[in-house]
Image (spheres, rainbow, N blue to C red):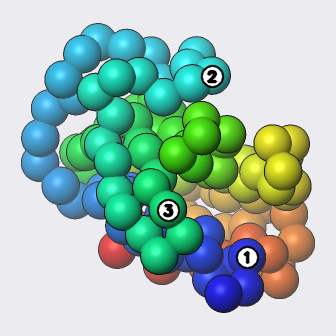
């Protein structure tokens, strides 16, 4: 699977912008470097991936982070009032690329080839 396709699958599976549900603890995901014990765990063909917070509502502001099973970072998202503003995608433990978006989803920074259309990320 190509890297962009894997990122698209992960974000679509974990972002769940329209989901209802409460964040179980009042942890600031933006400050986390490792997944907390109550992270959501999903099995994929490539292994387990963990995300925190598990479900965010449509007006959520903060971060959503996804890690590989071994705790290495995979995707970090910055969200404001339900809109994705920044995505850091990691490769081999370091930031592989960054995408920045305007509130409406317009790409402000990043490769259009690597930065997936934001509308897909909101599914």
Write down the residue under mark 2. 33
Q: Is residue 61 above or below residue 5?
A: above
Determine crowd level at label 2: few under 14, some 14-19, many 20+ residues with C-alpha closer than 10 A: few
Residue 36, picture quadrant:
top left
- Is 112 placed left or right of 35 in the picture? right
Say which label, 2 or 1, has the lower sequence index. Answer: 1
The dot on residue 47 is 3
Q: At which x and y percent is residue 69?
A: 52, 46
Up-down relation of residue 73 to residue 26 (above or below): below
Observer able to see residue 51: yes
Q: CA distance from mark 3 to mark 2?
A: 20 Å
Which type of secondary structure does the marked residue at label 1 adopt? helix
Q: Nearer the viewer, residue 86 or 65?
A: 65
Q: Nearer the viewer, mark 3 or mark 2?
A: 3
Q: Is residue 113 above or below residue 82?
A: below
Q: Which residue is mark 1?
A: 3
- The picture places residue 47, in percent across and down from the top left corner, at 49, 62
Q: Secondary structure at mark 2?
A: loop
Task: Say whether disc 3 or disc 2 marks the residue closer to the N-terminus.
Answer: 2
Q: CA distance from mark 2 to mark 1?
A: 22 Å
Q: Position of residue 16 (x, y in %)?
A: 30, 59
Viewer-nearest of discs 3 and 1:
3
Residue 10's spot in the image, x, y percent?
A: 49, 66
- Kindly indicate whether the residue at mark 1 contacts the one at mark 2 (C-beta within 8 angstroms): no
Crowding around mark 3 (Cα neighbors within 10 Å: few <14, some 14 to 19, many 20+) is few
Compared with residue 52, is residue 106 higher up or lower down, i.e. above or below? below
Q: Quarter of the image for the C terminus: give it.
A: bottom left
Left or right: 117 with respect to 50? right
Name the residue: 44% across, 16% down: 28
| Among the 4 quarters of the image, the one containing residue 76 | top right
């Amino acid at each position: 699977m190509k890297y962009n396709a894997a990122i698209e699958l992960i974000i679509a599976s974990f972002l769940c912008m329209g989901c209802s549900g409460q964040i179980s603890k009042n942890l600031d995901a933006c400050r986390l470097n490792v997944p907390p014990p109550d992270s959501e765990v999903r099995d994929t063909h490539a292994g387990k991936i963990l995300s925190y917070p598990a479900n965010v509502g449509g007006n959520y502001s903060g971060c959503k982070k996804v890690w590989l099973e071994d705790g290495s970072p995979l995707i970090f998202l910055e969200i404001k009032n339900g809109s994705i503003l920044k995505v850091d995608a990691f490769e081999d433990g370091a930031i592989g690329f960054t995408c920045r978006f305007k509130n409406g989803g317009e790409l402000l920074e990043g490769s259009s080839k690597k930065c997936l259309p934001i509308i897909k990320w909101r599914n």
